[in-house]
Image: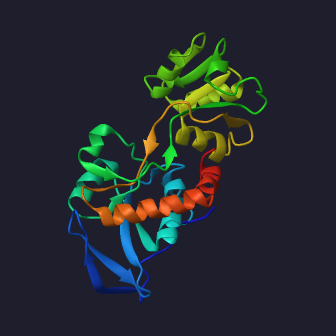
Amino acid sequence: MKQRKVFALLGLLLMVGMTVFAGGGRQAATTADGSRIFTFASDATWPPMEFVDETSGEVIGFSIDLINAIGDAAGFVPEIKNTAWDGIFAGLANNQYDAVISSVTITDERKLQYDFSNPYVNAGQVIVVRNSTNNISGPADLAGKKAGAQQGTTGAFAISDIAGASLQNYDEIGLAIAALARGDLDAVVADGPIAADFALQNENYANTLKIVGDPFTEEFYGVVVRKGNSEVLDLVNQGLATITANGTLEQIKAKWLY
């Protein structure tokens, strides 16, 4: 499993040539070759998007591979700061880091307070089935089927909106996944990253479950910066455009998601 790059090595940081950013006043360090170092906060508790590797202690996951690839493409060095979710936006406002990459959904309400990059993934609802299932490839195929979801979630609401689908509610998504693996359900509907964590990364289910089709609801994630921080935002969007065009983004999605 690819681990995130290690930055801030002794001897590489030159605390000279510091740049004052627009929209926040945070100063940037540079590496020995002149590359700027930007700090990205991430709540590393959300596999497979961002989480701590139990062996190495490093923060890894989709988001980490993504920002490293963006940095490579745009010519900057991303440094990850593991930050608890409940204080992550306050830290951004207080200039403790330059940006947030932590599976943040782009919403109109948040856009009033922060600037977002272009969206990099749709983490909407997807369908999980057993590997032997061949008659379900999208939400319409759930008609006449028993589909499980965590009670009160977007997945449960999505199933309720499908004519003829039988919603089976569970207290938590792990119970629904276990029921699917046992054959008690025909499918499970969940957020894309959650589904990928169970169906692709969990050793108990990786060989028995699969994700079918694409997300059928929209919940786009983006990188967050302070209002007016066009320097970081422009570089992130530049790198994102490059890795989208050259196929790197799809490779990262295939590795961690679906």
User: Which residue is painted at 30% across and 85% down in the image?
Assistant: 15
Left or right placement of residue 253 versus residue 94 in this view: right
At a point 54% along the width and 49% down the height, the residue shown is: 48
Of residues 24 and 178, the one nearer the viewer is 24
Q: Nearer the viewer, residue 130 or 182?
A: 130
On the question of residue 67 being in view, the answer is no
Residue 115 visible here: yes
- Residue visible at 65% across and 40% down in the picture: 199
Rendered image coloring scheme: rainbow
Q: Is residue 222 above or below residue 154?
A: below
How many marks the image carries: the answer is 0
Question: Would you place residue 139 above or below residue 75 in this image?
Answer: above
Across and down, in percent, residue 220 comes to 45, 42
* Residue 251 x, y percent position in the rendering: 64, 56
| Front-lying residue, 211 or 234 | 234
As drawn, 167 above or below 187:
above
164 lies above or below 182: above
Q: Quadrant of the N terminus?
A: bottom right
Instruction: Give the quadrant of residue 8.
Output: bottom left
> On the rendered structure, is 96 left or right of 154?
left
Can you say which quadrant of the picture contains the C terminus? top right
Q: Position of residue 134 (x, y in %)?
A: 77, 27
Q: In the rendered view, does 186 fall on the left or right side of 77?
A: right
